[in-house]
Image: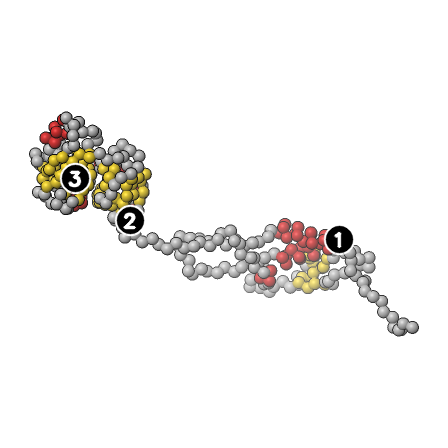
Amino acid sequence: MRGSYDQTFVVYGAVFLPNATQTKIAEINYGGKILLPTSALDLLLRMNIQYPMLFKLTNMAAQRITHCGVLEFSAPEGQAILPHWMMQQLGLSDGDTIRVESATVPKATFAKLKPMSLEFLNITNPKAFLEVELRKYACLTKGDRIPTSYAGQTLEFSIVDVKPANSVCIIECDVNLDFDAPEGYVEEPRQVAPAVNVKPPPPPASAFVGVGKPLGGAATTATSVFGGAGRRLDGKKKPTSSVSLCSEGTTGASTSDAAAVANDLPAIPPVVVNEDYKPGRCSFVRYDYKRVDVLEKELREREAKEKSQPSKMFQGSNRTLRGAR
């Protein structure tokens, strides 16, 4: 005997199931499967209904439909036990009638769910959590609102979209699961982070003025004797040295190379307190400094370039006191 199963039952909630425990009631209410009487099983076996057994539930008065599986065939005769969320979805009350038809729906390939509570954000691994909870459901219908249990509280999800049809089977299939923003979630505006690759220019060398003076005492004063530069008649240049005498009687010599390098060294800027700092981000400013060896190399190259150029001393035109005859 082959055909389509089509019966009408009186619906009741899980609390009306005879000898039902709290565990059994929770199993029914947090799932997508119904309970049918034993006579329905006998009829389904004679009709050779294919497995898994899936059904289409229709509230004929409100013209609302959904799809589900079957959990057990232990309901009282003439009755169907439905989860509480399914009765709300169909607009049914205890004692109403419902039409139950056998149905064939395709395997799901994609499902998009929308959490109806911000508590969803507290779940560390939502996909693993739903992988366990969705095993209690046989079908997903677009527009349904299904409940799940997490840490003693109820989390509801709205079925935003399913593919390849509006009703799909999720038994033994691979589903690409996606989430919509939770109900009531407001995304914080994103702050544009400054470019980290751009280095600010170094402070001027004039910032070195006053750096290195001893605290609480008189500063060491250096007097330059015979300072300046000399000129040779043959036009060649020769590095000159200046002798400096300190107030303590110590004589020290500093070459022109070291002096030029010291003038080119950048100064360390003073520390400025950022009073508008917000926790969660720390910025490290990197100035475009040059190392001492790089500065010395540039100085040597500049001096070598100047030596290679011809001397411009003793140039000009001659003048006589007497006028031309």
Could you say where residue 256 lies in the image, as x and y percent from the top left? 70, 57
Position of the C terminus, as image quadrant, is bottom right
In this figure, which residue is indicated by the disc labeled 3?
Answer: 57
Residue 226, quarter of picture = bottom right
For numbered disc 2, what is the local secondary structure? loop
For numbered disc 1, what is the local secondary structure? helix
The answer to whether residue 211 shows anywhere in this view is no
Q: How is the image coloured?
A: secondary structure
Image position of 322 with respect to 121: above or below: below
* Residue type, mark 3 in image: Leu
Q: Nearer the viewer, mark 1 or mark 2?
A: 2
Left or right of 40 in this view: 191: right
Q: Give whichever of discs 1 and 2 has the lower sequence position.
A: 2
Q: CA distance from mark 2 to mark 3?
A: 28 Å
**Residue sitting at x 51%, y 51%:** 197
Q: CA distance from mark 1 to mark 3?
A: 99 Å
Image position of 320 with respect to 68: above or below: below
In this figure, which residue is indicated by the disc labeled 1?
Answer: 308
Left or right of 13 in this view: 51: right
**Residue sitting at x 65%, y 55%:** 261
Q: How many marks?
A: 3
Question: Which of these two is toward me, 158 or 185?
Answer: 158
Residue 88, quarter of picture = top left
Could you say where residue 201 lies in the image, as x and y percent from the top left? 55, 57
In this figure, which residue is indicated by the disc labeled 2?
Answer: 182
Position of the N terminus, as image quadrant, is top left
Q: Nearer the viewer, mark 1 or mark 3?
A: 3
* Label 1, residues with CA under 10 Å away: few <14, some 14-19, many ≥20: few
Q: Give whichever of discs 2 and 3 has the lower sequence position.
A: 3
For numbered disc 3, what is the local secondary structure? strand
Left or right of 92 in this view: 107: right
